[in-house]
Image: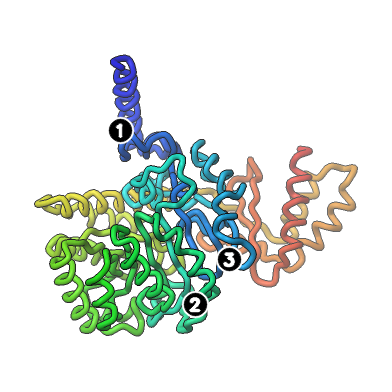
């Protein structure tokens, strides 16, 4: 036992040294080992337990490991039942990959946050806290049964601006869900706006009656509140995550198009009064963007005063709103602003928020390093004729004529001018390495792009 403790202490020391060295020298690591320093030792045997403990139901009927992984589909409700998905090969495959710290099957969202040391906001942490190594039944379920919403938020893709009650989930699905609801420790509800999705009320009624200990976490925009909702929240075991992106009326209504700031404030007051009576909690889900980046510290202070925990979402699209696409000069300005903020750690909530704010700074520092790297990369511009001439000199003589015919066909219709910040089609990082990456742009045909890339790779392999 003493030897085991000695090795654990040594391992912990070495990992903490790795984290320190990374910070001192600005290094970035993709290793899950550093991330594990921010987790209880009990959970460090694998990077994520979502595949084993959770099941996510997407609005299109897909059943997936979690709400962060939208690619590795276990099955769909049209062709498979829940028991078949839970015992299926794809679920076992992903669980095995995660045991080996393999993020390649749709887990890039969490992987990127590990790379930027944004450990506090890593989605995988949600699934750490329910241990069931031999239990095939999920202890957590996440529901996104519809995209029905009352707002048109500027950071949501147009296809998510759904004002329809349509859903692929029917009564048969809800009946088949009941045996699993009995075993749940936690259920998470997304939208759209969850309080507008009627299927959720059937689930909530069942849980209130048959599984009172299950914690129901609802991600709401805070603009919908009725007597029915008040009764549900009063009778059940609920926690709320409320979207708060600005405390200024003009900016709030710009971001949350269709919302009224005064109504939101009134609802927020009721929600906080309710949580005090029920002794439950509220989180703020914040989207840091180009339009509200300088307001984030104010929202954190507001959350501290109310006793709400903050979580920072990542906005990748549209690019005009995403912090990661800002130039380094603007990112540096945001980082300096955030680092001047000092939040007093008066209680556990304030300490939690300070930790998550520092994690957000780490995320933006990662964007800053990427921006510096991109701005310093060598860019070379070629006209179509110059590129063809260059490639002709590099292609193997035996296949030169046939390859050039295909190359000319592929290049036709492509924009060959290289831009510094907005690459249309082709990016050349250095003349020496001749590394090419192709994008589909304008009238370029995807098949031609693929053929074009293959020609380049074939020719350069023979250099």
Residue found farthest to the top:
3
As measured in the structure, the alpha-carbon distance from the residue carrying label 1 to the one carrying label 3 is: 47 Å
Query: Which secondary structure lies at badge 3?
Result: loop
Dots 1, 3 in contact, CB < 8 A: no
Give the Cα separation between the discs numbered 2 and 3: 25 Å
Report which quarter residue 16 is drawn in: top left
Q: Nearer the viewer, residue 308 or 52?
A: 52
Closer to the eye: label 1 or 3:
3
- Any part of residue 419 in sight: no
Instruction: Please state which of residues 422 and 287 is positioned toward the viewer in this rendering.
Output: 287
CB-based contact (under 8 Å), mark 1 and mark 2: no
Q: Earlier in the sequence, mark 1 or mark 3?
A: 1
Q: Quadrant of the C terminus?
A: top right
Q: Earlier in the sequence, mark 1 or mark 2?
A: 1
Tell me which residue sits at (30%, 18%) in the image: 6
The tag on residue 77 is: 3
For residue 400, above or below residue 241: above
Of the image marks 2 and 3, the number of the one nearer the N terminus: 3
Label 2: how many residues lie within 10 Å, few (<14), some (14-19) or many (20+)? few
CA distance separating discs 1 and 2? 42 Å
Image side of residue 269 versus residue 447, left or right: left
Q: Residue at x 43, y 69 (%)?
A: 320
Residue toward you, 309 or 248: 309
Colouring method of the image: rainbow
Q: Is residue 109 above or below residue 261?
A: above
Q: Which residue is mark 2?
A: 158
Tell whether label 3 touches label 2 (CB within 8 Å): no
Please tell me the numbered disc located at residue 416: none
Disc 1 crowd, CA 10 A, few/some/many (<14, 14-19, 20+): some
| Residue receiving disc 1 | 20
């Amino acid at each position: 036992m003493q030897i085991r403790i000695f090795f654990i202490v040594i391992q912990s020391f070495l990992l903490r040294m790795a984290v320190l060295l990374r910070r001192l020298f600005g290094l970035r690591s993709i290793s899950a080992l550093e991330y594990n320093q921010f987790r209880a030792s009990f959970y460090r045997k694998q990077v994520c337990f979502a595949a084993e403990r959770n099941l996510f139901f997407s609005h299109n009927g897909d059943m997936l490991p979690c709400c962060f992984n939208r690619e590795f589909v276990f099955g769909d409700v049209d062709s498979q039942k829940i028991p078949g998905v839970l015992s299926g090969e794809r679920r076992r495959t992903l669980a095995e990959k995660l045991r080996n710290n393999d993020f390649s099957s749709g887990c890039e969202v969490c992987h990127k946050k590990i790379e930027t040391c944004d450990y506090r906001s890593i989605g995988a942490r949600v699934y750490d806290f329910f241990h069931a190594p031999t239990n095939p039944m999920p202890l957590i379920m996440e529901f996104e049964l519809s995209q029905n919403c009352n707002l048109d938020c500027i950071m949501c893709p147009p296809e998510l601006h759904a004002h329809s009650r349509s859903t692929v989930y029917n009564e048969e699905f809800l009946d088949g869900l009941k045996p699993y609801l009995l075993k749940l420790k936690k259920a998470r509800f997304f939208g759209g706006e969850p309080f507008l999705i009627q299927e959720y009320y059937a689930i909530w009624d069942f849980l209130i009656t048959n599984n009172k200990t299950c914690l129901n976490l609802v991600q709401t925009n805070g603009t919908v509140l009725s007597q029915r909702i008040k009764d549900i929240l009063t009778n059940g075991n609920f926690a709320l995550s409320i979207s708060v992106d600005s405390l200024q009326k003009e900016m709030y209504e710009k971001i949350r198009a269709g919302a009224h700031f005064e109504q939101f404030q009134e609802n927020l007051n009721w929600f906080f009064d309710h949580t005090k009576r029920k002794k439950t909690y509220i989180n703020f889900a914040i989207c840091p963007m180009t339009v509200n980046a300088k307001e984030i510290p104010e929202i954190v202070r507001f959350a501290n005063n109310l006793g709400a925990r903050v979580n920072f979402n990542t906005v990748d699209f549209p690019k005009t709103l995403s912090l990661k696409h800002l130039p380094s000069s603007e990112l540096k300005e945001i980082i300096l602003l955030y680092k001047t903020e000092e939040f007093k750690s008066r209680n556990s909530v304030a300490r939690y928020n300070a930790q998550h704010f520092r994690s957000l700074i780490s995320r933006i520092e990662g964007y800053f390093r990427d921006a510096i790297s991109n701005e310093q990369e060598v860019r070379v511009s070629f006209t179509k004729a110059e590129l063809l001439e260059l490639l002709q000199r590099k292609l193997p003589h035996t296949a030169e004529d046939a390859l050039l015919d295909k190359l000319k066909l592929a290049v036709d219709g492509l924009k060959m001018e290289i831009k510094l910040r907005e690459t249309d089609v082709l990016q050349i990082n250095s003349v020496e390495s001749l590394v090419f990456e192709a994008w589909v742009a304008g009238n370029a045909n995807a098949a031609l792009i693929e053929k074009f890339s293959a020609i380049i790779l074939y020719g350069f392999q023979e250099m």
